[in-house]
Amino acid sequence: MLNITFTNEARKALHSFLDKEGGAACFRLREFVSGCVSCRNDVRRILRVTLDAPEENDVTAEAGGMPFVMEALLLANYGNSFFISLDRNNMPAVTALRALFH
């Protein structure tokens, strides 16, 4: 089970994104990797929120009246508690509260 909390500003922004999308969309917590992955220099793992559709092996949750999903395999690295705020560009940024690595 996912435990997701967010700032009021992030909640409003997410609701706005979902209202524009409509249909059966949900928010996916997704990992992005930046840097030189093959040489392992300056590799950064970043969590973000994207609009998507649920898949078979997803863990699902509802937070703030909105549906969220995350690939079950990512929970092993990030745990199940997340905080969503807005970054300096007013885009949702995700922080894993119990990540097993940094």
Image (cartoon, rainbow, N blue to C red):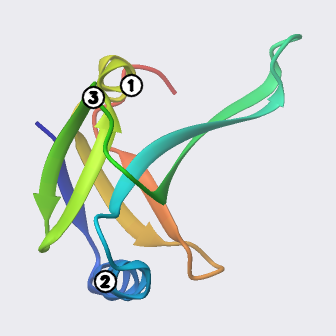
Q: Amino acid at mark 1?
A: Leu
Which residue in the structure is indicated by mark 2?
15
Of the numbered discs 1 and 3, the one sitting upstream in the chain is: 3
Q: Are marks 1 and 3 in contact (CB under 8 Å)?
A: no
Where disc 2 sits, the SS reads helix
> Which of the two residues, 30 or 47, is positioned nearer the viewer here?
30
* Picture disc at residue 56: 3
The image position of residue 70, as x and y in percent, is 33, 39
* Picture disc at residue 74: 1
**Which residue is at a point 26% across and 54% down the rendered structure image?**
68
Q: Quadrant of residue 39?
A: top right
Q: Amino acid at mark 3?
A: Glu
Where disc 1 sits, the SS reads helix
Q: CA distance from mark 2 to mark 3?
A: 24 Å
**Which residue is at a point 43% across and 87% down the rendered structure image?**
20
Q: Quadrant of residue 67?
A: bottom left
Relative placement, left or right, of 29 versus 83 is right
Relative placement, left or right, of 12 versus 38 is left
Q: Amino acid at mark 2?
A: His
The image position of residue 24, as x and y in percent, is 28, 64
Of the numbered discs 2 and 3, the one sitting upstream in the chain is: 2
